Amino acid sequence: MSLPFPSLSAAEAAELIQNGQTIGFSGFTPAGAAKAIPAALAEKAKREHTAGREFKVGVLTGASTGKSLDGALAEAEAISFRTPYQSNATLRKQINAGQVRFVDMHLSVLPQNARYGFLGPIHWAVVEACDITPGGGIVLSTSVGASNTYLRLADRILIELNARHPSSLLGIHDIFEPLDPPARQEIPVYSASDRIGSPICVVDAKKIVGIVRTDLADETGAFDEATPVTDRIGQNVAEFLAAEMKAGRIPPQFLPLQSGVGNIANAVLGALGRSTEIPPFQMYTEVLQDSVVPLLENGRCTFASTTALTLSPEAMAKVAGDIEYYKKRIVLRPQEISNHPEIVRRIGIVSMNTAIEVDLGGNVNSTHVMGKTMMNGIGGSGDFTRNAYLSIFSCPSTAKDGKISAIVPLASHQDHSEHCVQIVVTEHGVADLRGKDPHERAKIIIEQCAHPDYREQLRDYLRLTKAGHAPLSLSLGLAMHRAFVRNGDMRGINWEEYR
């Protein structure tokens, strides 16, 4: 079909973007991320820098992206500002060195913050699509993220029309953008399978400056193989949820699940899929990984609502090869809807996310190593945790060959407070914090979740902090972190030395 939009090369498209402009890119994880234009923009930045000219842009996305977007632009030192989430090693170094301004943000609020003008003007939307109509109807590819909002707000639009993703994806997306206050109304999603919007994004065709044709796979990387530790964590979560159902605290038809990204999340979903005590379930989440595809095939997962298909090329080929089957079982929504607190609270989601560290009060750090070094960002974990029917955080009990304990007296950075965290899981067990006062929480976290090498040390801390509603010592709370910085190991500290 002939389109009434100029056909451009990626380099020609990049030449249109100027220093200091802000770009809203498609992509939520590498799924559906723009690839050719940001890579060409990185090459332009290198040329400008070689010529002695400044060239940096503000980068907005849905979440993290791939090597051709965050990776290429970071290596070209072409990013001035980044939000809401990232996972690229080069970009992470630049953020922690103060070379790139990074604003960590709950993913559900990003689109509305853009609409409210909190992020400034959006000069360009650069979005990957699998099809486009002459009138400006855009069929997105393997994610929605914040693309629909960027397309509407941006002054001008560039489209990467990617032949790698079939146009038959039409119908898998459900594009809905709420009105802003005071006109906002109820979001009418009552189950994971409800559809409330349009299968396409419709934009003012006059804003589309050009089309760049590509044939590029999503730059999704493989996860590590399961380990005895991640398998045990997954099994602990599955056994806990089965027990909750037996106790009548989860209904017999079960509740929708949300799962974070990564190796532990895959292990948890694998354990839930294998459990004979847990019935078939739905997912209302932000990312679907490879582990969900066989669950959809064998009926263990009956429906999955998400904003991104973060699949390996092999898994994506399987989905694309039987797309009519999967379109009946998957819906891709904007992240504002996939992560919306109203829906999370309404349908009773069980949220399952990972932590860097958990303190004895039940507070969780999921973003900063030793309190100051940014890893990736808070992502969507807070959107779900604060509103879930059950909020679960899991992590291995130790890191760095046992030299770091994930269970600490006081979290060095706090993303999720004790008021939002209900269940903590490590390979050693499950700490159910519901209905527990601060001293009870501390004891159960130590006994159920801490590594045996650290339990007596943590018990000693409790004995030193008896007074007060919470077991807290301002002088000793970060002593284990200080010991690691000083000696490279959190074990075997002398509490008196840190008073």
Image (tube, rainbow, N blue to C red):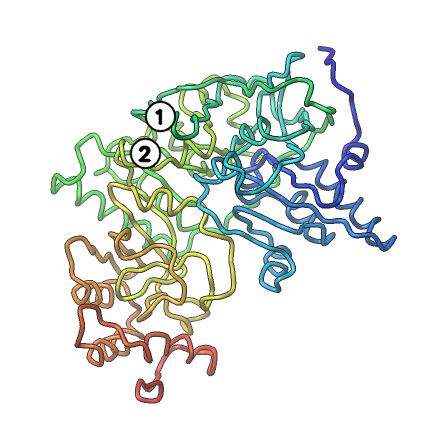
Identify the residue at horizontal 58%, vertical 21% (top origin). Answer: 139
Sooner in the amino-acid sequence: mark 2 or mark 1:
1
Please tell me whether mark 2 sits on a helix, a strand or a loop.
Answer: helix
Identify the residue at horizontal 34%, vertical 37% (top origin). Answer: 341
Residue that numbered label 2 is attached to: 342
Q: Which mark is residue 187?
A: 1
Question: Nearest the camera: 172 or 46?
Answer: 46
Residue 266 is situated, as x and y percent measured from the top left of the image, at 41, 45
**Contact? badges 2 and 1 (CB < 8 Å):** yes
Residue 35 is situated, as x and y percent measured from the top left of the image, at 68, 37
Identify the residue at horizontal 55%, vertical 47% (top origin). Answer: 83
Question: Nearest the camera: 121 or 381?
Answer: 121
Q: Neighbour class for label 1 at 10 Å: few (<14), some, many (≥20)? A: some
- Residue 245 lies in what quarter of the image? top left
> Distance from label 2 to label 1 (Cα)?
8 Å
Quarter of the rendering occupied by the C terminus: bottom left
Q: Amino acid at mark 1?
A: Ile
Residue 93 is situated, as x and y percent measured from the top left of the image, at 61, 61
Relative to residue 366, is residue 349 depicted above or below? above
Please tell me whether mark 1 sits on a helix, a strand or a loop.
Answer: loop
- Residue 305 lies in what quarter of the image? top left
Q: Neighbour class for label 2 at 10 Å: few (<14), some, many (≥20)? A: some
Q: Amino acid at mark 2?
A: Glu
